[in-house]
């Protein structure tokens, strides 16, 4: 929802025309209706929202009766131009949509219902749902109507003393209200993206001369850093915190900041209290990011992939490690498997059932992306770790989009290259590895469609039985008419299913899970261009049953980074950073923009 008023005004008349009228196809004569009366004289709403107001007639009519609707500012609100009351009917619910624009914080729109026998006026107050934000990292969903950010402060530069943590409340219910607190020397990268811990506590990693964990409380009204902890590491040698139970774990590459013998996991305790402490678990061979992102196995244990003795990934001596006893003074790191593990997202382990670990390997030929690639499962990892016989999957894909997932049950999901061994082609597949807890394990494969490169093209889990991802269609390009949402369902059944719901042009952001059977997306509208007046939010519901798509107009809405789905008492909204009047992202006039999701 950028301030592109000219584009919006050009698009809205088309939307109004598309709304059409609600004339009923009846052969009966239609007479002028009795005097119409709105059930309320005024109503307040937020731009982009649909709402309904009841219109009644002063008396019933023996034949169908027609009421005309008009507005003093038709570009600001969508509604049918006429309403037909069937014979004897004196009440109809009229659906309106408040058009998303940005002429100011409040617009007053007059809607008039009229017949030759009289008229009635409805005053609609439309509140802007955006706010000035500036240069920031986020949003991260915090709670109902609230998102949190790391911000660059007044000077517009990260890594300086005026960097801030910011919380925005009132999202989806009106104009967002921002409150902030100093959080000096943030990196301005995903490293400083806020992490939400149990109890609504937020952790932010500051770089500075020494990397420091900042604990922020009193969100959203008066955020404040009430505790901080300097970590025994170098600023360029740490990873973003991962929450494991009531603790946060940071991977450190030691004093030399490279994958080597002095690497360690830093376990931060005391979250929620005024005093944070850290204990160190020495763990040589940690990568800067993938595949050494810690994966929670339970509240006090985790899985992590390390490079092995040669400190290189993909050479055959990589190690899958279980770290247990995070609640004790001396957590224990136990190697449970060594073999060919790729040094990207496909090498991140999968946790299942609190006792099972699994990781993709190159298989007997020691070559990644071939037909004998396997899933190595290790059972009873917290007791007597027992590697199962490797389960052959087929050619495992690569890159951030190929991150394997656990369903939360007894299955793992792994993306494959298909028979052509080429990523991003129409024969790509999803392997569903089932019965991980006991032999015989088995693999079922379903078509996956073309993949979108990078993490935004990865799988998004909705439930133990359903996952989704963007489908760029036959042309392999996001933002064209053949885009869709690929649905993977019946994941716990012997015969899983795969299908695509056509959505029209999408923006290249991963689907956002609404619930176990629906997902939200950002659409580019009929002009195939994000940031113009016909952008939409999309919801695909009924996944796992009768899937159906609905959309909602947003006005110009082009996220600069990963958007967040924010739940509110009024429904759900998509929040994102967008460019301001200068139409350039990453500048001081960037906005927090909100778009209502169907």
Image (cartoon, rainbow, N blue to C red):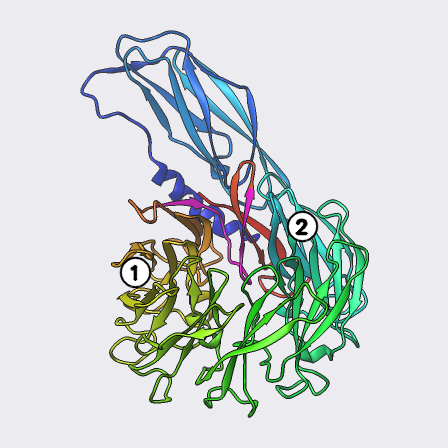
Q: Is residue 550 above or below residue 446?
A: above
Query: Residue, x 39% and y 42% (percent of image)?
Result: 15
Instruction: Identify which residue is drawn at 76% across, 76% down.
Output: 232
Location of mark 2 (residue): 200
Residue 248 pos. (x, y %): 66, 64
Residue 117 sits above or below residue 556 on the image: above
Image quarter hosting the C terminus? top left
Residue 220 in the figure: left or right of residue 356: right
Image check: 378 left or right of 177? Answer: left
Sequence order check, earlier mark of 2 and 1? 2
Is 138 placed left or right of 539 in the picture? right
The residue closer to the viewer here, 283 or 394, is 283
Q: Secondary structure at mark 2?
A: helix
Residue 556: in magenta span:
yes
Element class at badge 1: loop
In this orientation, which residue lies closer to the viewer: 518 or 312?
312
Q: Which residues are magenta?
A: 549-567
**Of 118 and 324, which appears nearest the observer?**
324
Question: Where's residue 260, x and y in %?
Answer: 63, 88
Residue at image position (31%, 47%) is 547
Pinpoint residue 527: horizontal percent, then vertical percent.
38, 57
Which mark lies nearer to you, 2 or 1? 2
Q: Mark 2 and mark 1: span between their CA atoms? A: 40 Å
Is residue 27 shown to the viewer in this render?
yes
**Residue at 69% of width from left, 56% of height from top?**
202
Numbered marks: total: 2
Q: Which residue is mark 1?
A: 482
Q: Which mark is residue 261?
A: none
From this viewpoint, which residue is outermost toward the front? 384
Residue 534 in view in this figure? no
């Amino acid at each position: 929802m950028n301030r592109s008023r000219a584009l919006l005004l050009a698009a809205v008349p088309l939307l109004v025309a598309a709304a059409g009228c609600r004339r009923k196809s009846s052969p009966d004569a239609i007479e002028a209706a009795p005097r119409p009366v709105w059930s309320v004289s005024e109503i307040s709403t937020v731009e982009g929202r649909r709402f309904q107001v009841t219109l009644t007639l002063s008396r019933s009519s023996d034949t169908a009766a027609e009421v005309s609707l008009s507005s003093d500012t038709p570009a600001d609100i969508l509604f049918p131009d006429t309403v037909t009351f069937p014979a004897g009917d004196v009440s109809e619910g009229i659906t309106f949509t408040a058009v998303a624009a940005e002429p100011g914080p409040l617009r007053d729109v007059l809607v008039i219902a009229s017949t030759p026998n009289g008229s009635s006026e409805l005053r609609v107050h439309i509140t802007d749902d955006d706010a000035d934000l500036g240069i920031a990292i986020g949003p991260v969903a915090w709670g109902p109507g609230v998102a949190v950010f790391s911000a660059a402060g007044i000077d517009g530069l990260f890594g300086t003393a005026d960097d801030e943590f910011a919380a925005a409340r009132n999202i989806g219910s009106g104009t967002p209200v921002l409150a902030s607190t100093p959080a000096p020397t943030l990196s301005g990268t995903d490293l400083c993206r806020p992490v939400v811990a149990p109890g609504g506590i937020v952790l932010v990693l500051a770089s500075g001369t020494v990397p420091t964990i900042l604990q922020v409380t009193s969100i959203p009204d008066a955020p404040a850093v009430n505790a901080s902890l300097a970590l025994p590491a170098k600023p360029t040698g740490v990873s973003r915190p991962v929450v494991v139970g009531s603790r946060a774990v940071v991977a450190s590459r030691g004093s030399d900041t490279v994958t080597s013998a002095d690497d360690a996991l830093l376990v931060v305790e005391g979250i929620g209290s005024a005093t944070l402490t850290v204990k160190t678990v020495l763990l040589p061979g940690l990568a800067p990011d993938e595949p050494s992102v810690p994966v929670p196995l339970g509240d006090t244990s985790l899985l992590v992939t390390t490079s092995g003795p040669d400190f290189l990934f993909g050479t055959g001596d990589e190690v899958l490690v279980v770290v247990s006893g995070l609640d004790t003074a001396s957590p224990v790191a136990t190697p449970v498997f060594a073999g060919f593990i790729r040094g990207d997202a496909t090498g991140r382990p999968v946790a299942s059932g609190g006792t099972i670990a699994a990781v993709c390997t190159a298989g007997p030929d020691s070559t990644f992306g071939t037909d004998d690639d396997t899933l190595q499962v290790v059972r009873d990892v917290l007791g007597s770790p027992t590697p199962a016989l490797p389960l052959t999957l087929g050619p495992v894909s690569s890159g951030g989009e190929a991150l394997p997932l656990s369903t939360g049950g007894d299955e793992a999901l792994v993306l494959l290259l298909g028979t052509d061994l080429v990523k991003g082609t129409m024969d790509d597949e999803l392997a569903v590895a089932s019965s991980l807890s006991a032999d015989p394990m088995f693999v079922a494969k379903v078509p996956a469609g073309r993949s979108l490169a990078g993490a935004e093209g990865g799988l998004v889990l909705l439930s133990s039985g359903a996952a989704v991802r963007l489908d760029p269609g036959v042309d392999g390009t996001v933002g064209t008419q053949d885009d869709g949402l690929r649905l993977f369902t019946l994941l716990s059944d012997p015969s899983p299913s795969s299908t695509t719901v056509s959505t029209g042009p999408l923006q290249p952001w991963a689907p956002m899970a609404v619930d176990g059977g629906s997902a939200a997306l950002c659409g580019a509208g009929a002009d195939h261009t994000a940031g113009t007046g016909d952008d939409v939010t999309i919801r695909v519901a009924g996944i796992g049953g009768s899937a159906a798509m609905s959309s909602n107009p947003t006005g110009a809405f082009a996220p600069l980074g990963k958007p967040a789905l924010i739940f509110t008492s009024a429904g759900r909204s998509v929040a994102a950073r967008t460019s301001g009047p200068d139409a350039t992202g990453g500048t001081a006039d960037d906005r927090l923009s909100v778009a209502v999701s169907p």
